[in-house]
Amino acid sequence: MILKNRIMVFERPLLEGADGPVMLRMFVVTGDDFSLIIDTAMIGYEEMAAEALAAVKQWGRPLAMVINTHAHHDHIGLNSWVRGQVPVLIASHAWGSRWIGDTDQNYREFTLGYPDIIQDSLELQSSVRGTMGPGTTMNVGFYGGEQVNLGSVPLEIVDLSGHLPGEVGVLVNDQRTLIMGDAFTGLNMPFFHSHVRPDLYRKTLERVAGMVRSGRVERILPTHLPPWNGSEAIYKAIEERRSELDSLDEALLMELNGESLSLTDLWSRISERWGKAVDFRGLNMIDAHLNDLCHRGLAGQSGRWFWRV
C-alpha cells in the first residue's frame, strides 16, 4: 500500500484481537536519493520483508538504513535477514543496542526476568526466541531530535519511550505523519501489551499531543493498530491510554488497600480482573507500575511485597 508519495506500508495479520485482526507492519519511506525501512517484523514474515525490499528496488532509491522503533522480537526479527540481502545500517533508540546485538540476552531479560515466577518453556522459545533471529550490530543510536536526510525533506526522530525504556518514532515532516512501533500500546490484545516505564509513557503521550496541537502531526501509523487520522482520533487514542495508566494505578492501590500483597498476587489478580492472559508481559508491566507507585510515595515495598502508603 502506498500512502501519498513517500510512505509505503506492508502488512500481514499477527494475531486475533478483541476487535478483529492485529496486524504486523513494515514501513518504507523514500526520499529523492535514499530509502529507509522502519522495523523488520520477525522470522516467519520473510515474504513481507521481500516485498518491501522489492519496492525499494523498484523505486530506485537505495536502502540506506533500517530503523527499529524498539528492540522487541516482532520489530527486529529480520534485521539479519534484511542485512543479508542489502548492506544497510541498523539504527534504533540507543537503549536497544544490547538487545539488538544479543538476542539471547534480549530473550532472557524480556521473558525471564523473574525466573522464580516464570520459567523457560518450549512455548516461549518458539513464540519469542524463535522469531528473533541472530543479533545484529546496531550502527546508529538515537535519543530523539535527530534528523535523517534522504535527499529531500528531512525526517525527524522522535523519542517515544515508555513501552520500553527506549523507543523512537519517525516523523515524515512533509506528510505530517508519525510512524511508530508500539509507543501507543494495544488495548484490544488478549494479553497486556505492556509498558515498563509508565512515567516515560505519560511523557510520550504528552509529547505527541503537543505535536498534534502545533500542527506537526495529523496522522499516526502504528505497527499493530489501525492508523489514527486527524487530531480528534489521535487525541482520543491518547486519552484512552492515559485512562488505562490511571486505571492500572487505581486497581493496584485498591488491591493494596489494607493488606500487603506479593508481586505474584497482584499480577494474577489484575490480569484476571482485566481479562488478560497471565503472562510475562503483564508481569513486567505490573512490576513497573508498582515501582512507579513506590517512587511517587503511594506504595511501599520490601522485596516483592507491596502495601499502600
Image: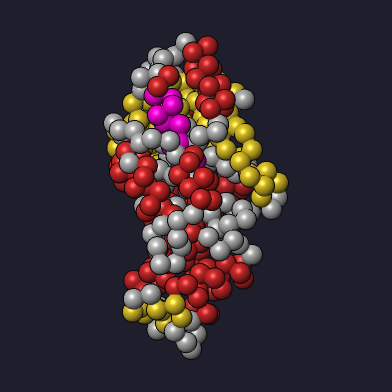
- Quadrant where the N terminus lies? top right
Q: Is residue 180 above or below residue 272?
A: above
Q: How is the image coloured?
A: secondary structure
Q: Is residue 243 above or below residue 69?
A: below
Q: Nearer the viewer, residue 98 or 8?
A: 98
Q: Answer left or right for 135 relative to 284.
A: left
Q: Nearer the viewer, residue 127 or 61?
A: 127
Residue drawn at the location 52% of the way across and 31% of the way down: 26
Q: Quadrant of residue 47?
A: top right
Location of residue 82 in the rendering, given as x and y in whole percent from the top left corner? 43, 25
Residue drawn at the location 34% of the way across and 76% of the way down: 303
Q: Is residue 35 above or below residue 306?
A: above
The majority secondary structure of the magenta stretch comes to: helix
- Quadrant where the C terminus lies? bottom left
Q: Is residue 225 magenta?
A: no
Location of residue 251 in the rendering, given as x and y in whole percent from the top left corner? 54, 74
What residue span does the magenta drawing correspond to? 73-83
Number of labels in the image equals: 0
Residue drawn at the location 36% of the way across and 80% of the way down: 300
Q: Answer left or right for 238 relative to 16.
A: left
Q: Answer left or right for 98 relative to 44.
A: left
Q: Quadrant of residue 221?
A: top right
Residue drawn at the location 55% of the way across and 33% of the way down: 44
Location of residue 53 in the rendering, given as x and y in whole percent from the top left corner? 50, 20
User: Is residue 145 something that shows in the picture?
Assistant: no
User: Is residue 98 something that shows in the picture?
Assistant: yes
Location of residue 165 in the rendering, given as x and y in whole percent from the top left corner? 36, 52
Q: Residue furthest bottom?
A: 258
